[in-house]
Image: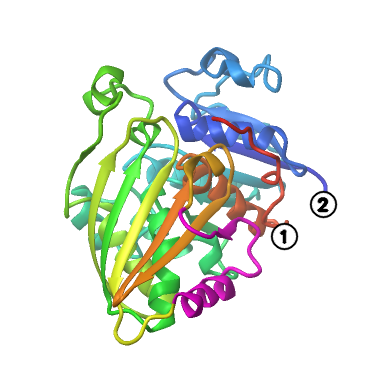
Amino acid sequence: MTSVPAAVLGATGYVGGELLRLIATHPVFDLVAAVSESRAGGRVMDTFPHLGSAFDDLQFAAHDAWLDRIPAASPLALFSAAPHGASAAMIATVLEQANDRGIDVRIVDVSADFRYRDAAAYEAVYGAAHGAPGLLGDFVCAVPEHLAGTDTQHVAHPGCFATAILLAAVPLLRSGVVSPELFVTGITGSTGSGRTPQQGTHHPERHSNLYAYKALAHRHAPEIVNLAEAASGTRASVNFVPHSGPFARGIFATVQAKATGNADASQLRDAFESLYADTPFVRIVDGSPKLKNVVASNIAEIGIAVAGDTVVAMSAIDNLVKGAAGGAMQWMNRLFGQPDAAGLAGIPPGWT
């Protein structure tokens, strides 16, 4: 395939920066616009110095000043890393303008705006009206490993916590050997709170600290319930307690369930390996997954443990890559007929 123009909305956040980094070395996608109203006209390398060698002269574009860079009747790979509640309206504007010029837009949204199929469900979780309810039916939401393909041109990537938990929970539910009540602990790095400083991510508060927040009330829980049911056929209750960890990148999730009969560790491992056999980024490991094995990569490590009637599945991912930009890139690769691993197969650094 010849090169495909790519653009990133909300390009100044941590996820936006990761998308720019991945596009920089992608074999097909060619960045034409890093969109940010707040920093329009500023150099990308001033916000992301580590991207200077790839984008030394590129400037951020305003929302109303970039689509004309795309030739009429051209394809466009559009990633949105805009904030929840803002992404939908921005996407709707792009689609309207692109349609007028015959541009074939395919979208992967990393915000929460298209993770629910109806506006009422979205409003119940986020407490605000949806920005483009007429587009909800045009998106599908799933972890790439749980949906072989889609007939839509647009995809919503699940949240970072949801990605880590679903990778561990769905094989358990599909196996049929556990009751549909899951007890989940997830620990996330500070980048999961976004670029804007706040008390929870302030270094003196977070350094050498560990604490739970929004116990049993995190807004990702309904999303996890819905997506787990879609991928496994079982509707489970999810008792989720998230934690803030004293590190920048990564999520470690532990999913516990009770077995309905005799639970066999090797049988469960077979269920996980069977589901993920043809996926390039999920590794089933002996013992516990480790964050240092996955940080800065699109890899997910999963470990399994069984004791009596208790079953545990553990998952480790990089929240910014597999949980956001990398998973989004997997989806965009598929939307343009590319292998999942295109632009994602680089060797990550060790000792991060």
Q: Give, as a three-letter code, the residue at label 2.
A: Met
Which tag, 1 or 2, sits closer to the chain's start? 2
The C terminus: image quadrant? top right
Residue that protrudes farthest toward the right in the picture: 2
The front one of 128 and 187 is 187
Question: Does 308 lie within the magenta span?
Answer: no
Residue under numbered circle 1: 337
Residue located at (58% from left, 58% from top): 283
How many residues crowd around disc 1 within 10 Å: few (fewer than 14), some, or many (20 or more)? few
The front one of 210 and 63 is 210
* Looking at the image, residue 93 lies above or below residue 235: above
Q: Give, as a three-letter code, the residue at label 1.
A: Gly
The front one of 69 and 10 is 10
Question: Does 271 lie within the magenta span?
Answer: yes
Residue under numbered circle 2: 1
Q: Which residues are magenta?
A: 265-288
Instruction: Choose top left, top right, bottom left or bottom right for residue 166.
Output: bottom left
Residue 13 is situated, as x and y percent measured from the top left of the image, at 44, 29
Residue 210 is situated, as x and y percent measured from the top left of the image, at 25, 35
Q: Secondary structure at mark 2?
A: loop
Instruction: Choose top left, top right, bottom left or bottom right for residue 32.
Output: top right
**Residue 46 seen anywhere in this rendered image of the structure:** yes
Residue 45 is situated, as x and y percent measured from the top left of the image, at 59, 15
